[in-house]
Image: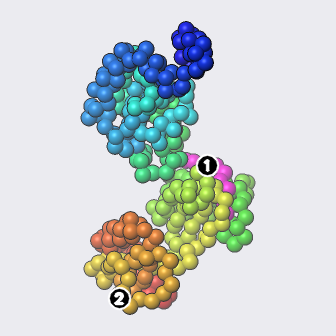
Amino acid sequence: MCRDKGLVKRCIRCRKLPSWPCLDGYHSKVMAGGNERSMKALKEVWKRAENSLCADCGKPDPDWASSTLGVFICLSCSGIHRNIPSISKVKSLKMDYWADAQVQFLAKHGNAVTKAIYEAHIPIYYYQPTYNDCQVLREQWIQAKYERKEFTEPGKQLPYSDGVKEGILWKRGRDNGQFLPRKFFLSEREGCLKYFTKQDAKEPKISVKIDVINATFQPEKIGNPNGLQITYLKDNKTRNIFVYHESGKDAFAKGEVFVGSGENGYSVQKGLPSGTQGNFSWHYGITIVTPDREYLFTCETETDQLDWIRAFTSVINQAMTPQEYAIEAYFKFKS
């Protein structure tokens, strides 16, 4: 609203109400003097090298900031900050008005100073997510820093640092696809993950060594922001456990290909062999070459194709372990 009642009255008398551009122009003139100084000072702070990356995920060129924490952040992380309004007030560096006091606060703090406070004592094992990671990881990271202040004091006892984690997860049944609550138990001392079909059960349904487990957040694949896929080897076969998800997934892979090292005759090639026939809905091919045969895959986009080739190449460039030689022998025997 325009605060000059006289201006509004004059416009009414002329039977012409001011349009929004007229009001905005009037308002900008009133604030121009102070805001120009603030914006100039803000740009000086903004272009400091320490503020060139998002303070929370490392994404380049952040264009938002927290006026209460003093950090420069990206648009995605600013949305997470909005969920903790009692701690962080976020504003656009390009579109919002910044008062002199707020700019001075940013200048005094900035990413380097604030990170030195809130990230002073991060445990060596704590994974710090980047902008390529899923939402739930970045949410927990930001909440751990600013809301729970988990890393501000040395030797602070954290809930996940006592070596034991126990709780209930909804797990999909392997055969019937029904989701049921299951008790999961993770132990550092025993080095294993267990789950029990009943809370009072004495023996676990499954006990898996941590060193053969791969756990990944799969919010899009699973259809739940907290969905987790736990993968491990059982009898030389890949087993999947899906928890906190809505759509059914197979507990066992539809098919598997063992990928060994280059020195053992494994390689990856871009594209499909000449003359390959088939009704392919995706056109970016990958050929996995093994000592016994070739396996053909297609990707939806060229970016996916290149990402998969890099992933396969990183595996092929590694020397095989004794355990992997045993798995390779199992696959050859099975085929």
Q: Going by the image, does 307 lie left or right of 244?
A: left
Question: What x and y, as percent, mark residue 211?
Answer: 45, 61
Q: Which of these two is toward me, 311 or 264?
A: 311
Residue type indicated by callout 1: Glu
Residue at x 46% of width, y 83% of height: 331
Residue at x 35% of width, y 68% of height: 306
Query: Sequence-wise, which precedes: disc 1 or disc 2?
Result: 1
Q: What stretch is highlighted in magenta?
A: 161-172
Q: Which of marks 1 and 2 is in front?
A: 2
- Tell me the distance, in whole angstroms, between the alpha carbons under discs 1 and 2: 54 Å
Q: Residue farthest to the top?
A: 6
- Crowd class of label 2 (few under 14; some 14 to 19; many from 20; radius 10 Å): few
- Residue 14 sits in quarter: top right
Magenta stretch containing residue 21, yes or no?
no
Q: Which residue was labeled with disc 2?
A: 274
Q: Do the residues labelled 1 and 2 touch (CB within 8 Å)?
A: no
- Crowd class of label 1 (few under 14; some 14 to 19; many from 20; radius 10 Å): few
Q: Is mark 1 on a helix, strand or loop?
A: strand
Q: Which residue was labeled with disc 1?
A: 166
Question: What x and y, as percent, mark residue 300?
Answer: 46, 70
Residue at x 52% of width, y 38% of height: 80
Residue type indicated by callout 2: Ser
The N terminus lies in quadrant: top right
- Residue 326 sits in quarter: bottom left
Residue at x 32% of width, y 73% of height: 316
Mark linked to residue 92: none
Question: What x and y, as percent, mark residue 81?
Answer: 50, 34
Main secondary structure of the magenta stretch: strand
